[in-house]
Amino acid sequence: MGLDGEESLATSERAEENANDRTEATSPPRDGEDESTIRRAKEEGAETGSKVEFLSTNIQAGSQSPVLEQEYRPPLPPRPNNVNILREGSYSPGSSLKRPGKTPRPLLQSTATTALSRTEVNTQSYQDGSRESFAASAQRTPPSKAVAAFGSIRKVKGLSDSEGGDSASVRSYAPTLETGGDAESLLGEVLGASQESPAWRLLGTQNEAPDPFDSVTYEDDEATADFYREFDEIGAVAADGENEEQLLKKWKSKRKHFLILSSAGKPIYNRHGDDNLISGYIGIIQTIISFYEGSHDQLKGFTAAGARFVVMSQGPLYLVAISKLGENDAQLRVQLEALYMQILSTLTLPNLTHMFSNRPSTDLRRPLQGTEPLLSALADTFTRGSPPTLLSALECLKIRKSHRQAINDTLLRTRCETLLYGLIVASGRLVSVVRPRKHSLHPSDLQLIFNMLFEARGVKAGGGENWIPLCLPGFNKNGYLYMYVSFVSAYDSEAEQGSEGHETGKPDDIAILLISANKESFYDLRKMRDALVEELEVHGSMAIIKSAVRRGRPTATDIVPGTVLRHFLYKSRANVQFTMPSYEPSFTTLLARRRLLSLYHALHASIHAKNAHLKVHHCISRESISLAWVTPLFELYCVAGPHASRNALAQSANKVIQWVRREEERVFIIGGAVSIHSLDNHTTYESLTLPAARYSD
Amino acid sequence: MADSAAAPPKPSSSVKLVLLGEAAVGKSSLVLRFVNNDFQENKEPTIGAAFLTQKSHLPHRTIKFEIWDTAGQERFASLAPMYYRNAQSALVVYDLTKPTSLVKAKHWVAELQRQASPGIVIALVGNKLDLTNEDAAASGETNTGEGGDVESGEAAEESGDARKISAKEGRDYAEEEGLLFFETSAKTGVNVQEVFTAIANAIPETQMKGAKGSGAAGAGTGQTALGSERVNLNQRAEGVKEGCAC
């Protein structure tokens, strides 16, 4: 995880180069030293305190010019100061490192470079655990304590790595500061983060509007209007390549990209645009990643031009997320993890590794053929914003406890021999689960299944019943299971018993999922499904499920009458489940919802910052006032309009807690006699057992 | 299931049918057209397999198709035996704008002839007729069922826009192997119903699962039985050849 000495050396070398470049640009080049001298000097410098001193001066220099950095593109903030420092101390190692200037290197200056100074300064304030801007904290590091500062930097580096913030990686100068990147939002400067995070700025509309969430005519705003086009196809490159430039422009306008490539550099999946169009970029990203790999460093992420790049390498695969939506590294990493899980779900791990160990240059697109829609559905879910992914939790359909019990019992009664898991899912919300005593169900697996059934249209649009081989990586990443799926429409009171396929087109369908390890068990499970549906009908359970689906989620004001709350997310940590009110009436548009989710992401990031140890977090911005509240039992995120008072918000939060407590056994599936763990690490899906009705195997 | 009560007095029986073919040739679209008389542009690929049922009403009997619509991707190929085992009929589909898909179709035919139940009725279907320039009337004439009206479909020659496989090429191969042959368009619906009707007709009464249909039916049965007999003979003969070609 952490960088060892060698790597940080490499990084600092680059920082020096940077500094030198800057110097060059403003001062005439000095004569004398040739390249090799410089290299030697650098190495010496890196190993001794003098090197550290250079670093610390650099830090100070950077801190003295925050204003400069606020300016736009030409991202070389500390240039003049730096130059001065270097000039003054002509005896200092810093100055002797000067490159014998030949041609200036504009590329190095203007694009993302390893910026040790900036990065370290950022992490510096991590350690403080304070919310001071990095400038302030950096200023407090006097140059005389250079060695100490260096040591602490190293320490912090490790810290931030384990946090998943990964700030100790490539990061360009300007955007880091400008866009309120990962580090900044983790710092807990939430007021700033929520206001100025790229998502807010990109999507932000009339800030003066009294009710930005609901009353704004987003379409008028040019910056935001095109979020609706985020999911549009880019189209293929014409044979003569004539439209390529235009397509690339379109491609660049997308707020979020996911790229998957093999470590040999073969493209495997990308959300937008065809391979020909972006092959150049694939090559670049592969080069960058393998450059770091070559130096036994692992590139985790970097920021360039307002976009956060997060890289995850999983065996023979590189997964890259590029987001302008202001999510932090940990959040993006969860999303990449989900994409990787989808690939495993298609291929299984042994297949994947086997293919690449046989032929490292394997083109994975062929074996993955047909999986693109599933990957794209996942990617688009993340781009729209997905509470289940953010919280790593499941949502359940709210029904009475006794009703759920009756459904559980029916599932258990009709269970056939070969059944492993049996689930009833209504429009992406879990109704009931049965599972064998010794096997747990993993939220990440369920996410894949839900995505396949409710986001990607492939299964549903086909109609009829389905028999799907899939690997559930959380359960066992080495083999396939077989899933029987059939849908029951929530709107046809006379249930058509699966023999007709046409009822499955509507969004709010109820899916019966029966999973078995036996690939021949389709007809058994089909029989079970018929028996199950019939029993559910007879006992009225089906009607209850259907009416619960039709009713939808309650609005926030249904839950807490007269509340100022617009929306909230409540996650029960013990149950790995969450509940939320309807997006109506405030967040009906795609954009409003995305902005809400961006706010949740910011709240989530600040409250989960490793060394923040926050319990309650208030955030006030022009658009909203919001609150994050975390206890060992739950996480609550609430959002109210900008004119609500803090007190009213806090009161409402309390009311929500009371409501959940009252309704706990309805909104969550509780009571399976399964050991309950708390979900401490929000970034990964734990192998948590989902409470469910059990049968003894 | 529930529909059995409403069944007409005509004898009814069920026929297991499996669709095979390369990915994205339009297997699911053919089924969707047959079952729901519907069409979706840019349909997402099938995952695993879908199971659907649809009744087909013939003059003398009703046939309930139990259709396995399989995914065409390579990685699902190993599951195919599970679907064609015990199937009385198979629809091997290719995309007449894509030569590789016919190659794949030939592989499937060979595999079926080797592995599936001996009497299986196979129909070779060239889909996406709408991508050619031929009008519906001309393409309608390519409807040359195996034992039926032959040699009427020379109209569908190489006049198409995107067509890469001539009707003749498909038909010659089908005749060689003793398959039913159709060119269809799931998009416009051309010939889709006809494929399934022809399959229904080609399946001999004795192979039907439903007990109801065993004793009844007259002239029609004789014809189809004859047809399928010829299918069988051809299949055996060609099956050996194809076996090594595979």
Image (cartoon, rainbow, N blue to C red):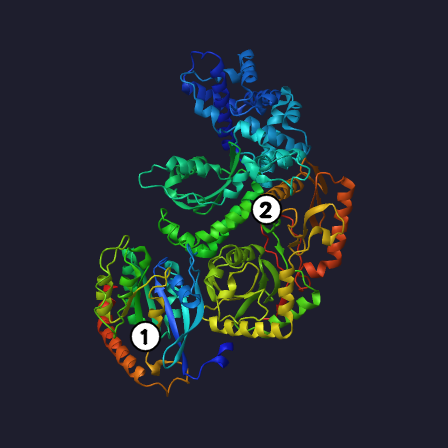
Kindly tell me whether residue A484 is visible in this rendering: no
Element type at marker 2? loop
Pinpoint residue B86: horizontal percent, then vertical percent. Answer: 37, 75
Q: Is residue A619 left or right of residue B196?
A: right
Kindly indicate whether the residues beneath marks 1 and 2 are on one polypeptide chain: no
The one nearer the camera, A444 or A45, is A444
What is the quadrant of residue A275 in the picture? top left
Pinpoint residue A304: horizontal percent, then vertical percent. Answer: 50, 32
Marks counted in the figure total 2
List the residue tagged with mark 1: B120
Q: Residue at x 70, y 51 (%)?
A: A556
* Quadrant showing the C terminus of chain A: bottom right
Marks 1, 2: nearer the viewer: 2
List the residue tagged with mark 2: A589
Disc assigned to residue B58: none
Pinpoint residue B23: horizontal percent, then vertical percent. Answer: 36, 58
What is the quadrant of residue B104 in the picture? bottom left
Mark 2 — on which chain does it sit? Answer: A
The one nearer the camera, A697 or B12, is B12
What is the CA distance from the residue labelled 1 to the residue labelled 2? 53 Å
Element type at marker 1? loop
* Quadrant showing the N terminus of chain A: top right
Q: Label 2 neighbourhood size at 10 Å, few (<14), some (14-19), many (20+)? A: some
Pinpoint residue A542: horizontal percent, then vertical percent. Answer: 62, 69
Q: Label 1 neighbourhood size at 10 Å, few (<14), some (14-19), many (20+)? A: many
Kindly tell me whether residue A615 is visible in this rendering: yes
Mark 1 — on which chain does it sit? Answer: B
The amino acid marked with disc number 1 is Ile
The amino acid marked with disc number 2 is Thr
